[in-house]
Structure formats: C-alpha cells, structure tokens
Image (cartoon, grey):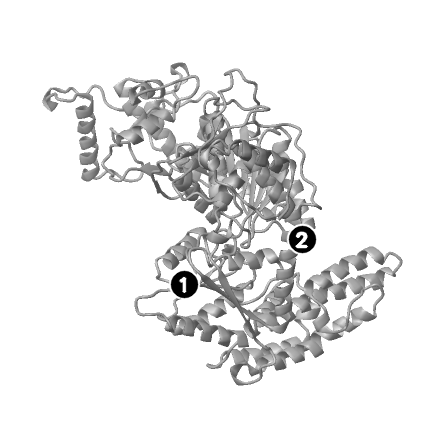
Amino acid sequence: MSLISTQEKRYNQQTRNDSEDEFGDDLNTSDLIQVATSVEQKYAAKISFIPEEDPTPPPALPEDTESFHPLDVENLRTWIYPINYPIRGYQLNIIQKALFNNTLVALPTGLGKTFIAAVVMFNYWRWYPNSKIIFMAPTRPLVTQQTEACFTICGLPLQDTVEISGQYAPVKRRDLWKRKRVFFSTPETVCNDIKNQACPTDKIVCVVVDEAHRATGKYAYTQVISELSKTNNHYRVLALTATPGSSLKAVQSVINNLNITNIQIRTEDSIDVREYSYSKSIESFIVPITYTQGATGILPRIINEYTSQVYEPILQQLSKSPNTGIQPEAALNTNYGIQKKKKTFQVTSIGINKYLKSQIITNFLVAEQMSRAYDLLCQYGIVSFVEHMEGLQRDKKAQFKFSNHPSILRMLLVLKKEMVKPDFSTHPKMDVLVRILVSHFSSLKPDESSKVMIFSSYRCSVSEICKALNTHNPLIRASSFVGQAVGNSTLKGLKQSEQQEIIRRFKSNELNVIVSTSIGEEGLDIGEVDLIVCYDSQSSPIRMLQRMGRTGRKRQGKCILLLTETEQKKFNQAKDTYARVQNLISRGERLIYYKPSTSILPSHYKPTLRRKYIHVGEYCDFSSAKPRMLLGTELDGFIDEDTEKAFVQSFCNRYEQYTDITQVLKNYWPNESLLKRLNSQVPLQSKITKSHLVGHSKRTFDFVNLVQKMEERILHPGEDLKTITSQALLTIPAKSKASPSSTLNIPKKRYRYDDNVTDLAKFYKSDVFMPSQENDFETVSFLQDIEDYNSAERFIT
C-alpha cells in the first residue's frame, strides 16, 4: 500500500536515523500518533498504537499561570491511564483525544465507553481541584450504575462524589453542589438546578453525556449545554453513544447541540476492535400472518375484516381529497407516513375551504389511530389490539369516530370470547417464541445455565409473553421489565427499586428470562446474556443496535429476530441506514464541527501519558437517602494505613499540605467543650414534659431516670454516682429564648369551651404576649383547645 504523507516521511527519516537502536527505542511517540491519525483520517482504518514507555512529562507550569479554573500545576504534567485492567489500544487512543477535544465517542455496546469516561473524569478531577464534573445519564437506574462503574475503574473518591436526583429537596441539592465535586445525575435535574442557580456553572470543567444520540430538539442534554455556555465556555464535553444517529442530519444535530469538535467512531469490524468484540450469530424467523390453522387461525380473518371494513375506507376518502398524497391500500401506508403527509397538507392547503380542510385533518387523525391499531394487530396480535381499542374508548380525547365504529365494536365482542378459550394464542409469533425458548433451555446440560432477553416495544405484549412463557416454569422463569410510566396499559409500571430487584434476580439466576420494553435497550448492566430475541423490528438503527448489543459481551452470543414480512423490510432498512451513516461519519466529509473560541488547558501545554495502577477500595451501595461509603475488608471500626494516607492526601492542595490525620482533625474538626459537643450531637430528654391528655407510665419515669444517670456518668466519668449532685445535665438547645421584659406569666388553669375563648385567642395572638418557658405547657394546651373550637379558625394561623 502506498501512503506517503509529510508525517510518514518524517517518521521514515527518523527510523533510518535511529537504525542503530534496536527496536527504535528513541522513536518520537507524538510523531507516531500523528502518522496514525493521518492513516485514520484517510483510510478510516482505525489503527491504535500503545507506546512501549511513557514519555517524559513537561516541566510544571508556574503557580501563577493564568487559567479560568484554578490548576494543580504538578498533576497537570501527566494524564493517568489506569492499568487495573488490560490496556486496549483503541481506548487509550480515544482517551488521549477526548482529554483535549470535545469528543463524541461512538462504540458498539460492551466495548468500554464508561471506562473512557471514567479516565477522562479522573484526570480533570486531578488537574482542577476546585472545579466540578458532571456525568449525565437519561434514567436513574443508569445513573446509579455509572456511579459505581466510574468508582470501580478509577477510584474517584466517594467523599467528593454524589448522585443527585429529584428525590433531594432543592435546598439539599444546593448544599451538595457547594460541597461535592463529582456529580452523577439525570439531565433534567441538572437543568433545573442550573436554572434555579443552585449549580455553580462557572466551576464546571467537564461534562459527560451518556446515550448522547438523545441530544436533539429540546431534550434536557441540549438545554444543559446551552445554559452552561451562557456563563462558562471553559469546559470539556465527552459524549457517549452506540451510534450517533439514524441519519446524517441527526448526527449533525448532536454535534451542534453538544459543541462537538471531534468524533471517534468504531464498529465491530474496526481493526483495533475486532479482538475484543465477540461475534454474534443473527438468525431471522419469518412468521407469516396468513397462518390459518390452530388457535391463531382467527388472526388473518380479523386483519382482513379490519382492513376492508375500517381502515381502507378512510384511506380511500383521504386519497380522493386534494393535496393528501395518500394511497388507498393499507400496506402502502405507515403511521409515520400518514403523519408526515398530514403536516404537508396543512402547509399546502391554504386555498382550500376551511370546512373541507377541517374534515380532511379529522380524517388524517382518524387514519393515524387506525394505522396504529393495524400495526398492533399485525405485529403483536389480538390481545394488544383489544387493549389498545379499549384504551381509546376510555380516553375522552380519543377519536370516537374510530373507537365507536360499529365494525370495531362487533370485532371486540368476538375477540373477547376467543381470548378466554384455553388454546387461544394471540399471534403466530408467540407459538414460535415458546418453541424456541423451550428448545434452548431443554438443550442445556444439567450443570449449565443460560440467560435470555426478549424485546418488545409494546407493554401489553410484554405481559402476554411473560404469561405464555411462565406456563413452562420452572424450565422458563420469566419476568417483565418495563419503565415507571403507567400509560393506558394494564401492565403497571415498575419503580426503580423494583427494576433493580429484577436485575438482581436475573444476575443471580433466579430468573432466566427478562421480557423488556425499550428501557432495557440503553446502557443498563443486565448481566451476561446468551440469547436475544427481538419480538418486533425497529426501523431505527440505534434501537436495533442497542438490542443486539445486549449479547456477545464476554462470549459468543446469538440474536433471533421474529419478523413478519413487513417487519423484515424494516430490519433490512435499519441495517442499510446504520452502515451508510457509520460510513459517512467515518469519512467526516459532510459534517460541520464546533469551533471553540477558548481553550481549557493553558495554550501550548500538553500533559503526557502516565500508566499507573490505581488502588480502588470496595464500593458499597446504600439507599439513596444515605451516603455512599468506602469500607475496608473488615468492619472493625478502624482504617488501614494505606486508606488513612489516602484520606489525609485528599485534603492536600497547593496551599495546604498534611502528613498525618491529627493535622487534618485540628483544622477541620476544631475542639469544643465537652458539654457543647454532646449537646449538639446527642440531645436527650432529661425531664418529663406534661401532657394535657394522659399521664405518664411508671416505665416512662424509669426511662427518664436512667437517661439522667447516663448523662451524669458521661459528665463525671470515674466518680461515684452518689456524690454527684445532678446540677449539670445535658439539655436540648432552645430554638429561641423569650426576652424577660416581654415574658408574661400566665396563671396555671385549664380552659373549658364555656370560657371566653374568642377574647383569649385575640390576646394570645397579640404582640404583647410572649409565653415564658415554664408556661409553654399552658399555652400549647390552650391553643389545642382553640383548634378544636368551631370558631377558632379565624384566630389560629
């Protein structure tokens, strides 16, 4: 192959000059990387090099170097690549570019996008000790998963890390933004905190965007970057995805919205990825819906009846109307196509009579609903169709012209009678699916286990699939895996805790089949899956790629597609679109990249590679209400020497240096008087408070007496309890103290409903009155009496 460029000539000349050095030890690594970049750009071959030795770091910058974010000039000399895991050339190559460019990383599922993100975040955490880093993921389960993954890879200190969500009150989140440095969150939470000025946007130095193909339109990813850029252009963006978009236009939108300056893309066929990518065998089962035998024989008859009596009549009306472009045949129209033609009609129908235009748009809306029902009937079967129609009948906003159609009502009566029969089957695909899984699990050896994941876009079909598979329990142990939204489906959504429990049971082999909607397609670590079954097909290459990426991560996997003739066309379209878009992105000829006006690092200064083994502790995940902690191997209340050193080192910066934990304690935990510390940390009830309803039991008096003796022992250690006078006791700090001059002594009496409650209430609410501490009981008692009084609402706030 002939490839002579300026970089290669320089490389060849230096190789000849260093010919006396065995293996070329003096080879300039930066030149070699430039050559590799040239080859990548020209041939899209994706060649990655791993240097044999780490280069010499540049000298440290002066302490007073100007920078938007305060620097750690010593750490800035190098960027660390953790060797806790085997080095992969493509990951090292991508990280080096992502550290110094706003990079969109497109890697097939399971090839280490999170590893790349963790290393980039770790180095920005080292370089900028006073700045903050954000990792955003679209769902809370994925946020939780990535929090643990980033710690496991690089050991980002847990005292600097927090996972924030809408479960925290805004005041609490504001406090976390002040105290923490690394934030894992959904984009909606970050966006809200930026708008509420809780997030210090001027301190953000790195933003990681997971599932970045979502960054289109008004999605929260777009809003976060837009809001950040209003006050701060000095931050790095790292975007992660399996594929950037289903079209070049969508990819360009992601580039624009995330300020991307560089794309790093790999496929499973890339040279430097092949050895790490396990092959997948893909098998398609074409299931004809014209199958008329057995329990599913009713389906083709219902499809024909629905098409001829309900769907095609409205299509024929639209085809005869002006400027619609609708074909009268059902097979020639898709739901998306009808929506697109409706929008075109609204733009081009300016001169049409308003009444006629309104009628045509109504027919378009009805046709959209009919098209949706037609797709459900053909792809998922009778049960999904019936549930959808009943949902429309319950929905007041639905098109009753469609849901109350006489033919529809007649079909629903027939189908409901069929559905209660013991041998009923909703769709021929269900029979094929059950046979495939029974055969798959029956062929396993007695000591073997296998896990299967089934994808179906429609929630009702998920429920039906689980029901059919669990008739073969314990051979097949299936569970549904759906999102939290309720919608119109009879299948309830799953809370985050319920989703995590299903994943745990799946990983521990309590379940061997998960039937999932789109929530299982993106990012979540479901565990190793041997077989993927796509119950339906998607025309989006992103979704099909993510589905099939669930298998073949650690060993060879298999994908089975259950398709009707129409769905087969969708799948072929998805494959062609994916290949075309990936090729266009690799060539980069038709994409326009963001051109930043400012830089993050000091100009003409570049850290060099330093490979290092990082000691990572054990990550312990508690509930979201409790902090995450780093624990040793034994829970004995003590930390080992290495952990103590790491803890002390975490407080060091260029202004303050500590060598032992006592210095840290002196500065961050100042000594206070024993009584003050005990009062602030363990306020105890040391005296009986009166109750106007019931008296106290003997057990209560005994308990208070015991507490008093405990306090005496704490305050007078080593002394004989008999000699203690009980003068100094722990007290609960009062929230406020009444001024002596404004204290009014209230006679101790209980008020009855026949007293002049109205006048007394006015008096107690006046500015003159402020109860003394000893009369709090009477005040509370009196106000409670007033609250029960019928007319008290006018006086009690």
Residue 372 location (% of width, % of height):
65, 66
Residue 625 visible to an observer of this rendering:
no
Q: Nearer the viewer, residue 191 or 268?
A: 268
Can residue 525 be spotted in the picture?
Answer: yes
Disc 1 residue type (three-letter): Lys
With respect to residue 592, does 291 lie above or below? below
Res 543 label: none
Secondary element under disc 1, as helix, strand or loop, is loop
Question: Crowding near pointer 1: few (<14 within 10 Å), some, many (20+)?
Answer: many
- Spot occupied by residue 572 in the image (x, y as percentages of width and height): 63, 65
Numbered badge on residue 247: 2
Give the residue number, with chain letter if any, for mark 1.
451
Is 730 on the left-hand or right-hand side of 230?
A: left
Horizontal side of residue 783 vs 68, given as left or right? left
> Which residue occupies 80% across, 57% down?
346
- Residue drawn 35% across the image and 61% down it: 509
Q: Is residue 290 above or below residue 674?
A: below
Q: Is residue 65 left or right of residue 505?
A: right
The amino acid at mark 2 is Ser
Estimate the x, y position of residue 773 in percent, counting from the top left. 34, 23
Contact between marks 1 and 2 (CB within 8 A): the answer is no
Residue at the outermost right position: 351
- 68 sits to left or right of 690: right
